[in-house]
């Protein structure tokens, strides 16, 4: 940002992740002014390796927002996924079951790069290394965000503040705890993820249920594999040398018949806990929370990024009604509108997680038998497979 630091805007957006950046692009379509405050540097946010599955609606919206050209060139459109269990493989034909809808595999950091380029290219204002340290007057018509930039504390006055600062941001904490209700479930395992310089093992995503634990084969390009194995909730990276990761992937993913995991140099290794989290309501005064600031879903359903996008579609539409015609009703309904989709995604993500992971509490043998019976049902019944498919490719966005 070359011009003098902004002191006032219509919508102050805290966070330049998918939620904040898509919101800024959507608001620009309604000629609503915004400023995005991002704590980290541009290089940092563009380098963070995160999720990688875009629902049909998310991919379509990115194209519509002028941030989809590279996605269309480099994104990998998949019409199906594979469920692997009991040493058998079954393809769920997502597109056939959903009237042609599909997912696109494209790294979140690539989405962020494209959105930043589109926003700045359109003259949008994103202030990097601007760390929001406090929100003020949220229960008034003149809220403000205090932030530190260049070692100096500054203030951005706004009509509305969008809290798009993720699970560890400050915006949710700015709401009095007496006004919030938290719903949370922590799963008794984590995911160990690697990015490997190796061609993907399969053409589509492979979700594995195995008695040793869950595994997932994904990808980032024809030369880059993204792979995950279920691990203990307190495991450390040091517990998982490369050889152990590859051995578990081979064992858990084996099927009767020829198949192999393509191995290669491990470029990144990370362990992420598995939780569900929702805060209600997702708004307070002139503050509106969106994305991970308000909810976390277990990664099994690949919903995180897509839910963030859905939230800001609702928020942008409500802000257009507010700024365009003084209609406050959509803003007043913002949280209730978002939470319908949030809880639908929580249900699906919890179901997928329960279906595919090993749980060591209670009667393990019985639980595994139930999982195999349900997997068998999902792969034999069109009705059951359709339920999985329509949730996985995602429902039309509220644009
Ligand atoms: N001030 C300014 N920016 C902040 C602050 C702060 N105090 N705290 C956090 N941020 C920034 C982070 O640096 C990050 O760039 O807010 C952004 C939040 O982005 P995400 O965490 O990606 O959250 P969201 O946009 O909701 O996207 C959700 O991201 O983490 C994944 O799995 C998640 O795929 C999902 C998606
Ligand atoms: C990924 O490619 O990172 C990915 C894919 C599907 C998931 C989770 C993560 O369910």
Image (tube, rainbow, N blue to C red):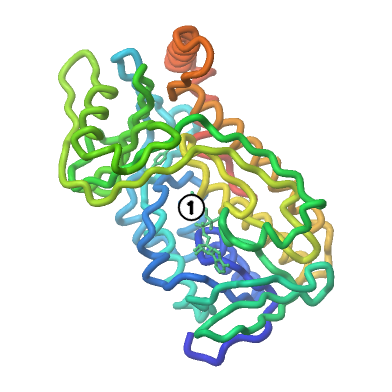
Q: Secondary structure at mark 1?
A: helix
State the residue position of label 1: 60
Residue 395 locus on image (x, y percent): 58, 40
**Residue at 67% in and 71% down:** 134
Residue 110 locus on image (x, y percent): 37, 59
Q: Nearer the viewer, residue 362 or 154?
A: 362
Position of 301 with respect to 104 (left or right) is right
Q: Nearer the viewer, residue 25 or 136?
A: 136
Name which quarter of the figure residue 211 lies in: top left
Position of 217 with respect to 137 (left or right) is left
10 Å neighbourhood of mark 1: few (<14), some, or many (≥20)?
A: some
User: Residue lying furthest bottom in this view?
Assistant: 4
The quadrant of the picture occupied by the C terminus is: bottom right
Mark 1 and ligand 1: say if the CB distance to the nearest ligand atom is below 8 Å. Answer: no
Residue 207 locus on image (x, y percent): 37, 28
Ligand 2 shown in quarter: top left
Q: How many marks?
A: 1
**Residue at 60% in and 76% down:** 35
Position of 83 with respect to 351 (left or right) is left
Residue 166 locus on image (x, y percent): 56, 57
Q: Reply above or below: 16 against 176.
A: below
**Residue at 75% in and 44% down:** 181
**Residue at 42% in and 41% down:** 103
Q: Nearer the viewer, residue 11 or 397?
A: 11
Q: Reply above or below: 72 against 252.
A: below
């Amino acid at each position: 940002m070359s011009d003098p630091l902004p002191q006032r805007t219509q919508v102050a957006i805290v966070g330049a992740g998918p939620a904040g950046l898509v919101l800024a692009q959507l608001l620009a379509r309604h000629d609503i002014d915004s400023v995005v405050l991002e704590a980290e540097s541009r290089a940092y946010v563009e380098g963070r390796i995160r999720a990688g599955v875009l629902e049909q609606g998310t991919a379509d919206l990115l194209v519509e927002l002028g941030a989809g050209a590279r996605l269309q060139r480099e994104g990998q459109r998949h019409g199906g996924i594979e469920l692997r269990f009991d040493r058998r493989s079954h393809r769920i034909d997502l597109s056939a079951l959903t009237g042609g809808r599909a997912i696109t595999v494209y790294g979140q950091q690539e989405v962020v790069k494209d959105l930043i380029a589109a926003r700045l290219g359109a003259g949008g204002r994103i202030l990097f290394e601007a760390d929001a340290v406090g929100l003020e007057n949220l229960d008034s018509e003149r809220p403000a965000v205090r932030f530190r930039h260049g070692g100096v504390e500054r203030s951005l006055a706004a009509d509305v503040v969008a809290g798009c600062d993720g699970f560890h941001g400050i915006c949710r904490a700015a709401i009095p705890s007496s006004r919030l209700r938290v719903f949370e479930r922590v799963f008794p395992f984590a995911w160990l993820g690697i990015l490997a310089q190796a061609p993907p093992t399969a053409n589509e995503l492979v979700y594995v249920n195995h008695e040793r634990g869950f595994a997932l084969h994904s990808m980032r390009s024809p030369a880059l594999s993204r792979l995950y194995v279920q691990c203990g909730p307190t495991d450390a990276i040091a517990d998982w040398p490369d050889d152990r990761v590859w051995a578990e992937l081979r064992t858990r993913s084996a099927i009767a018949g020829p198949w192999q995991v393509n191995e290669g140099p491990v470029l990144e290794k990370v362990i992420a806990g598995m939780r569900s989290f929702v805060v209600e309501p997702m708004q307070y005064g002139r503050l509106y929370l969106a994305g991970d600031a308000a909810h976390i879903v277990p990664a099994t359903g690949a919903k995180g990024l897509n839910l963030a996008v859905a939230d800001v579609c609702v928020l942008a539409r409500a802000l257009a009604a507010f700024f365009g015609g003084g209609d406050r009703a959509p803003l007043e309904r913002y949280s209730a509108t978002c939470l319908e989709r949030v809880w639908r995604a929580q249900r699906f993500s919890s179901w997928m997680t329960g279906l595919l992971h090993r749980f060591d509490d209670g009667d393990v043998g019985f639980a595994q038998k139930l999982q195999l019976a349900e997997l068998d049902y999902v792969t034999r019944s069109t009705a059951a497979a359709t339920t999985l498919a329509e949730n996985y490719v995602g429902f039309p966005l509220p644009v």
